[in-house]
Amino acid sequence: GLLAAPVTTATGFFDWWNRYQAYMTSVFKIKIAGAFVLMALAGPAVLLRAFQPDLAVLPLGGPGWVYFGLLAACTATCVVLGHYGGKLVFH
């Protein structure tokens, strides 16, 4: 996620700029904000896993729950981004 998000954000900006002439609508506002939220959530999740590789071992401790929360928030953000992306494609 952390490696793919900047690439998909950049290609999304490029597509928005060329296909939609950078016309700002609520869908684009949500997608732009969501892309940055996703990167902001994925960064700490990757760092937390890198510095504590055993944090996902059951039963979860404090850092494990933080990691779980970050991944759940990333998943929810991806669902929202996908929903609004679908609105653009199938409009």
Image (spheres, rainbow, N blue to C red):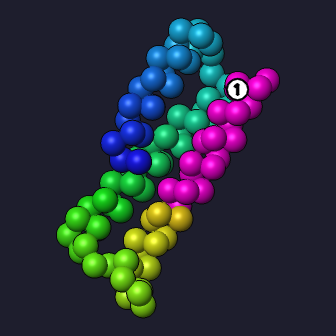
Residue at the farthest front position:
57
> To which quarter of the image does residue 20 belong?
top right
Q: In the image, is 47 to the left or to the right of 28?
A: left
Q: Is residue 77 magenta?
A: yes
Q: Is residue 45 above or below residue 18?
A: below
Q: Main secondary structure of the magenta part?
A: helix
Residue under the point 44% across and 79% down: 65
Q: Nearer the viewer, residue 38 or 2?
A: 2
In-front residue for pair 73/24: 73
Which residue type carries mark 1?
Leu
- Whether residue 26 is visible here, answered yes or no, is no
Examine the rendering and report whether any part of residue 91 can be seen: yes
For residue 34, side relative to residue 9 (left or right):
right
According to the picture, the residue beneath numbered tag 1 turns out to be 88
Which residue appears at 45% of the width and 65% of the height?
70
Against 58, residue 25 (above or below) is above
- Residue 45's x, y, as percent? 35, 62
Q: Quadrant of residue 26?
A: top right
What is the total number of numbered labels drawn onto the structure image?
Answer: 1
Q: Is residue 17 above or below residue 85?
A: above
Which residue lies at the image location 47% right of the left edge and 48% below the top edge? 37
User: 66 or 4: nearer the eye?
Assistant: 4
From the top left corner, tell me how far across and down residue 25 is, in percent. Answer: 68, 25
Asked whether 53 falls inside the magenta stretch, the response is: no
Judged from the image, the secondary structure of the residue bearing numbered disc 1 is helix
Q: Quadrant of the C terminus?
A: top right
Residue range in magenta is: 73-91
In the rendered image, the residue lying farthest to the left is 51
Q: Position of residue 34 (x, y in %)?
A: 54, 43
Q: Is residue 27 left or right of residue 65?
A: right
